[in-house]
Amino acid sequence: MGNSGAVPRILIRGGRVYDHEGDVHQPPQTDILIAGETIERLGQSLPAGDVTEIIDAAGKLVLPGFVNAHYHSHDVMAKGLFEEMPFDIWTLHSNPANYGPRSLEEVRLRTLIGAAESLRNGITTIQDFLTVEPQDEAIVDAVLSAYEEAGIRVVFAIAARDRAALDIAPFMPPDLPEAVRKRVAGSDRKARDELDFIAAQIKRLGLRPTPRQTWALAPSAPQRCSQQLLEGIAALSRAHDLPVFTHVYETRIQAAAARREGSVSSLLDVLAAAGLLTEKLGIVHGVWLTTDEIAQIAEAGSCVIHNPVSNLKLKSGVAPILDLHRAGVDIALGCDNYSCAETQNIFIAMRLLCLLPAVTDPAPGPISAAYALKAATLAGARAVGLSNAIGAIKPGMMADLIILDLNESAFVPFNSAARQIVFSESGRAVETVLVGGRPVVRGGKLVAIDEAALAVAVEKIAPAFRRDAQALADRNADLMAPLLSAGREAWKVPLGFERYISRGSS
Ligand SMILES: [Zn+2]
């Protein structure tokens, strides 16, 4: 072949290769031949004739790379700053709009930190739902170039919202001082400006800014967007065939607010009216969905992105995994942001996906380890608009692969690939990672990023971020009591179903 010299060809030899449809406990040994960015062939004892590299995978397990279908890189610097904050208090402390502008160096470093941890934990595709604050294309460029530097695949979305009020605003005490009320209400923006900025970035950078980068759309939440904004996003989605993500019913307060007199009855209806409730939609969180709304999602063919760690850390409740699954809704997984979930580790998300159904249902069920592996790969791929490109190890698909060392303690003795990946592994066995045929982690270390140097650079800018976070907390101090009071007020709105357990029979 005339171009065979130009395209790198990698042979991964002798590894056990995980196949969703095969033996998920004892995957058989198979060789993988990669040509350029795709998997060319699978087979026994493939010839090494014209390959540029052989990766010896004997005693190892090869998996499709994981898809983190929900993440925000804007608050990486806030990792470990908060705890014991219910959602509405957390959002006040973590919303980028409440911080001053950040330097492009901070933007680059924070993006690299998230990308680095993701890759080392086998996440080869990340959906970054980024609040660009202020809306400046230099920030977009800094983020995308940092992802490219790390070598991770990114499905990039610029968050859009034109309604600034806190979700909890309808329940705030009526006698709030004017200054406090203003902070709860925020400053609305123009739908047109939000849409123009996003459309301009897509036009400027193209639908595939690099071979590893694609776009999604990200209206923050139905209650944070005008109908005009949601319709504009739906039009962009149709025009460019882009997936859409939006936060829906993450908290009980959001569900209660939707039921207030004079408000809409269902946020799903709002999405449907805007033309967004389609198979391109990823419902993020979906903790407080009713049975009817779950049926509506199933009917539309939308999927749900389950973020079990942030749902628990922000005290939002337990998503109705079994109900969604029984209704036929695809469930993908997200690790969510650092300020509310602290780690980009989908092993933990898979484990919680499997374990949480037991809080409501004692019977054996369908959410198995093999199912969790599909959620972290195939369902994620579908959610981010990359079905048939990533999520499984098959000829013609992208060579986004993880190689796990089966000598690590999580896999000794090796009884079941699926179960030990989900219930035993933490990320420590991740030895080699490829994205689009390019090795980005070797020997457990990033190829393109010096993590020690990254840590030094980040420590230089971290004190300034911590000072800004403290100043923000000080400014917000007088809002804490009214927010907690509003939370209690919202609890009085009956929903007719429960997403917490053991609250007793009051
Ligand atoms: Zn989110």
Image (cartoon, rainbow, N blue to C red):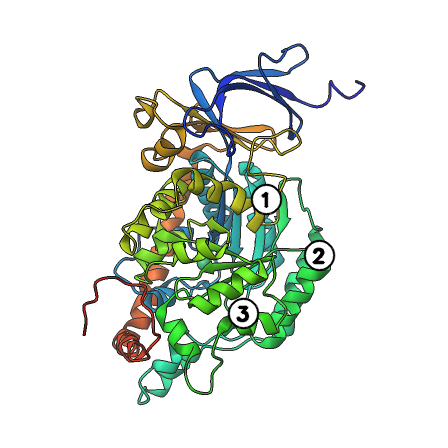
Secondary structure beneath dot 2 equals helix
State which tag comes first along the sequence, 2 or 3: 3
The reply, left or right, for residue 237 in relation to residue 479 is right
Cα distance in 3D space between marks 2 and 1: 22 Å
What amino acid does circle 3 point to? Answer: Arg
Placement of the C terminus among the 4 image quadrants: bottom left
State which tag comes first along the sequence, 3 or 1: 1
State which tag comes first along the sequence, 2 or 1: 1
Quarter of the figure with residue 431 = top left
Q: Position of residue 53 (x, y in %)?
A: 59, 16
Q: Residue furthest bottom?
A: 175
**Within 8 Å: ligand 1 and the Cβ of disc 2?**
no
**Local crowd at mark 2 within 10 Å, few (<14), some, or many (≥20)?**
few
| Residue that numbered label 3 is attached to | 161
**Local crowd at mark 1 within 10 Å, few (<14), some, or many (≥20)?**
some
Residue in the foreground of this view, choosing between 167 and 496: 496
Q: Position of residue 489 (x, y in %)?
A: 29, 80
Residue visible at 66% across and 22% down in the picture? 8
Cα distance in 3D space between marks 2 and 3: 20 Å
Tag shown at residue 145: 1
Which mark lies nearer to you, 3 or 1? 3
Secondary structure beneath dot 3 equals loop
**Local crowd at mark 3 within 10 Å, few (<14), some, or many (≥20)?**
many
Tag shown at residue 240: 2
Residue visible at 32% across and 72% down in the picture? 476
Q: Is residue 421 above or below residue 189?
A: above
Q: Position of residue 156 (x, y in %)?
A: 58, 51
- Numbered circles on residues, count: 3
The reply, left or right, for residue 453 in relation to residue 466 is right
